[in-house]
Amino acid sequence: MNRLRPDRIPRRRATALLAALAALNLAFAAVLIVPSYVTLTVPGQIPDFAAFWAAGRLTLEGAPALAYDWQAHRAAEVAGLGRDFAGWLPWHYPPPVQLAVTPLAALPLFGAMALWVGATLALFLWTCWRIVPHPNAVLAGLAAAPTAMTLINGQIGFVIAALLGLALLDLERRPARAGLLLGLLSFKPHLVVAVPVALIAAGHWRALATGAASVLALAALSWAALGAETWAAFVASIPDTTRVFAGTGAAEQDWAAAAGAYGWLRYLGAGFGPAMAAQGAVALVVLALTVWAWRAPATTPETKAALICFAAVAVTPRVLNYDLHILVIGALFQTRHALKHGFVPGEQLVLAGAALAAFVSMLAAPGLNPALAPALFACCWLGQVRGEAGRR
């Protein structure tokens, strides 16, 4: 049985480099957070977390269905922020997420955001350690460019990446628990559409069954707690959400934050049809290769986990820069595989290049972000093919 060998990680240079990048990343976040939310010297800047807080606040006030009313939800955001802002920051998440964030709304908005960001970052970093039990894994999580974006915006990226990473760690030995964790990914289902495809391909029926059960249980719990009216309001809001995500509605879409093929093409001026066709072509290729790899007996659990993380980001048309924590989880699984079996030639260079590209992309929107998931997927998949060829 191949064992994980963290001692193979070159300690001094890698640790020093990751520590420097982590410090730079945290400093970048602080430079934006302090003037935006503490000293208020950047007028009009608001965190995405305001949408979470406002949905929870409306729930505490006994009107959870109004979270899906743009006017009422915006009024709650303005009340929490203590100032008005331009545009809209609607609530698109399903009722189970609303139920989960409601306790945070008992605190002032920025206090709740600090608690949310701190707790979810800790969960994400702990997951990084679980995958590769070495300080460098934690530093990699802190150094990753999406970490700064999530610290600034208070988004849900840490949670989604951690849940996926923990589920993939449990999939082989504790499939029921893995399924329960995968069910929680219904919080942001468009980011993980590749996961059930891979599970079906590999015959992980127990994980699929418990995942479906946990989704139904969450739906039932939120139905009982928030009422049928809230679910009705959510369902009624889906067409508007679809138009917002696709950029075909009245709300202005910030394609500069795009991190996928569809958003990148829209940023360049392509229309909905051509951009979606290109995204569909990418998705079909990636899903086909994922199914092949997950069905292949020689594919290790670590390689499967890395591939599905990269595939999850590559196949969805709606992926933004703060969603890319999933790529960090995938890169750590790829590293975990290499610590057991050795790196394929060029693999370390691709991983380092992806990390650098993500960092550079923060300075030039949308930068290189749309190429990251396909490049990492291709590297990992080709490494799997070469590994199989070498074992024949």
Image: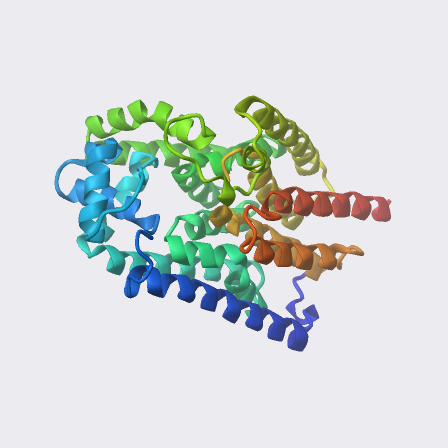
Q: Quadrant of residue 253?
A: top left
Total count of labels = 0
Residue 54 is situated, as x and y percent measured from the top left of the image, at 23, 44
The relative height of residue 30 versus residue 182 in the rendered view (above or below) is: below
Residue 87 is situated, as x and y percent measured from the top left of the image, at 31, 39
The relative height of residue 212 versus residue 145 in the rendered view (above or below) is: above
Look at 50% across and 48% down and name the residue there: 321
Q: Quadrant of residue 88?
A: top left
Residue 104 is situated, as x and y percent measured from the top left of the image, at 24, 52
Look at 34% across and 35% down and name the residue there: 92
**Is residue 229 shown left or right of residue 162?**
left
Q: 60 or 67: nearer the eye?
A: 67
**Is residue 150 shown left or right of residue 8?**
left
Q: How are the residues colored?
A: rainbow
Q: Visible in this render: residue 12? A: yes
Q: Quadrant of the C terminus?
A: top right
Q: Residue furthest bottom?
A: 12
**Is residue 130 shown left or right of residue 57?**
right
Residue 12 is situated, as x and y percent measured from the top left of the image, at 65, 77
Q: Quadrant of the N terminus?
A: bottom right
The relative height of residue 95 versus residue 337 in the rendered view (above or below) is: above
Q: 382 or 214: nearer the eye?
A: 382
Q: Visible in this render: residue 1? A: no
Look at 69% across and 61% down and name the residue there: 339
Look at 55% across and 43% down and name the residue there: 259
Q: 108 or 195: nearer the eye?
A: 108
Q: 126 or 362: nearer the eye?
A: 362
